[in-house]
Amino acid sequence: MSTDFAPQRPAVTPLAEGLVSRTFPAAVSADGKPDRASAAFVRAVEQGFYEPWHSDEQLERLVPTFVESGQEQTGVYVDRGFAGLEPWGEALEELGFDAEHPVGTFVDYHQTLNAGGAEPLPVQLITGVTVNAGFRRRGILKHMMTSRLAQAVEDGLPLAALTVSEGSIYGRFGFGAATRLRGLQINARSSGESFALRTAPIGTVLEVDPSKSEKVLKEVFAAFHRGTRGSVGRQAFYWKVGTARWDPENITSWDRKTRLLVHVREDGSIGGYAVITFEGWDTEPATMRVRDLIAADATSRIELMRHLAAMDLVERITTPNGSPVDDPLQQALVNPRAAKTTSLGDVLWVRVLNPVTALESREWNADGEFSLSITDALGICAGTFTVSVSGGVAQVSSTESTTTPQHFSLDVETLGSLYLGDVSVLTMREAGRIIADDAADWDAFSATFDLPTAPHCATHF
Ligand SMILES: CC(C)(COP(=O)(O)OP(=O)(O)OC[C@H]1O[C@@H](n2cnc3c(N)ncnc32)[C@H](O)[C@@H]1OP(=O)(O)O)[C@@H](O)C(=O)NCCC(=O)NCCS
């Protein structure tokens, strides 16, 4: 029997005595300067990641971009009245940061995620998660996460997503590692494991003035985002850095090392760009670092690499921020060893909030029917769902029946890892993370669920 489904708000973990929490939008005051609470919040985030203390000038540039993204800032603060009664209260009063500096920070905002369906879906992106070292392991993260996931459920968002500093933190909240990136080191010499491509060049690569290119960067990214399963929408930081206006080391300066390449197709349209930096003459071999390479299609991606490898004096190309796991470049090389993998790591972690919307907006490989029982420790989307895929589109509904032969059980973290197609249901079965009756046809399930290529999220946030 099919029933209506509404995700449940998770229970919000209460804060320990003496701590209070406040959520407010990133804001600038009437004079254009960052609002005091936002400025203190952003400084606390940087401290939480052991980064330098932001200057006022840096905050004047940074905070407006957070306002533009619609960031909601959740801070946890020490209640000064409570602290005054503690042995450490006097020291905090005399030596501590001002009262508007939080001891816990959590940022979220709305963006879109391409799950391979007809349209990208709305997603709650989470970032800036820190807890002051003196206040760790007393439930501050649990409070911030449960209260903001509760808000995402209220806002009707089908998914939440984040990137992680440590892989052990977020599984307990239902997030599963869902996309990966590969770091490459490419030999640009014509000797050794030499670089050469199997295909003839198409179009032209030009080095252009980064300061004139914001519109082009945005347009190319928009085309990439529309066409790439796993992509999430980008924040303003990428346009500031890509146009050389912000040096990531100090955003009040231009980045005079940034160079920008664009691939111009044969019809004159721009299909891709690469933001690159030369590592300097002291680095051996002479290395060009690709900081960001976005292309609307594989041809533009390969042509940008061809150009980089052909640059005089350059002997090595690196992509430390990551290339796609299924990079067509690898197969376009005459010598596959010309590109060496230097890293392989997760990027996007996905948390399903509403399985009906999430599964109906996903790409499917073939027609099929099955039911899924999902367990969820936070109780947001626990239940059983029937999924019927026809013509590449799924119809999903909540059900109370678990008696169909094609019935599979998994937890919400596992569903997050499967969602964008980075891992097969058959691998998850081998790992003991999906179970089914003996009658289940795993090959049919895999044929419907598993996708032919890996997802690609090129955005770090
Ligand atoms: C990660 C961090 C935010 C955790 O904050 P916290 O307030 O100490 O976390 P909580 O007390 O709410 O702990 C929640 C649960 O996560 C676990 N946990 C917290 N941090 C963990 C870590 N780094 N590794 C493994 N488990 C962790 C806790 O043991 C607790 O487990 P439980 O559910 O079994 O009780 C904090 O340690 C921090 O600021 N780290 C440095 C910055 C960082 O890495 N931020 C994450 C960015 S993605």
Image: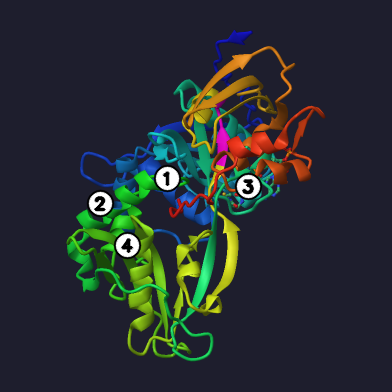
Q: Give the residue type at disc 3.
A: Val
Task: Please provide percent x and percent y for residue 218.
Answer: 27, 52
Residue annotated with mark 2:
219
- Secondary structure at numbered mark 2: helix
Residue annotated with mark 1:
232
Task: Please provide percent x and percent y for residue 309.
Answer: 39, 80
Relative height, residue 128 to residue 197 (above, below) = above
Residue annotated with mark 3:
423
Find out whether residue 415 is within the magenta segment: no
Q: Which of marks 1 and 3 is nearer the N terminus?
A: 1
* Residue at (46% x, 54% y) in the render: 460
- Cα–Cα span, label 4 and label 3: 33 Å
- Cα–Cα span, label 4 and label 1: 18 Å
376 and 306: which is toward the camera: 306
Is 446 situated left or right of 336 in this image?
right
Magenta span of residues: 350-355
**Are the residues tagged 3 and 2 within 8 Å (C-beta)?**
no
Is 21 situated left or right of 173 in this image?
left
Q: Which of marks 4 and 3 is nearer the N terminus?
A: 4
Q: Which of marks 4 and 2 is nearer the N terminus?
A: 2
* Residue at (36% x, 90% y) in the render: 313
- Cα–Cα span, label 4 and label 2: 16 Å
- Secondary structure at numbered mark 3: loop
Q: Give the residue type at disc 4.
A: Val
Residue 241, numbered circle: 4
Residue 380: image quadrant is top right
Residue 170, numbered circle: none
- Cα–Cα span, label 2 and label 1: 15 Å
Residue 83 seen by the camera:
no
Between marks 4 and 3 in the image, the one whose residue lies nearer the viewer: 3
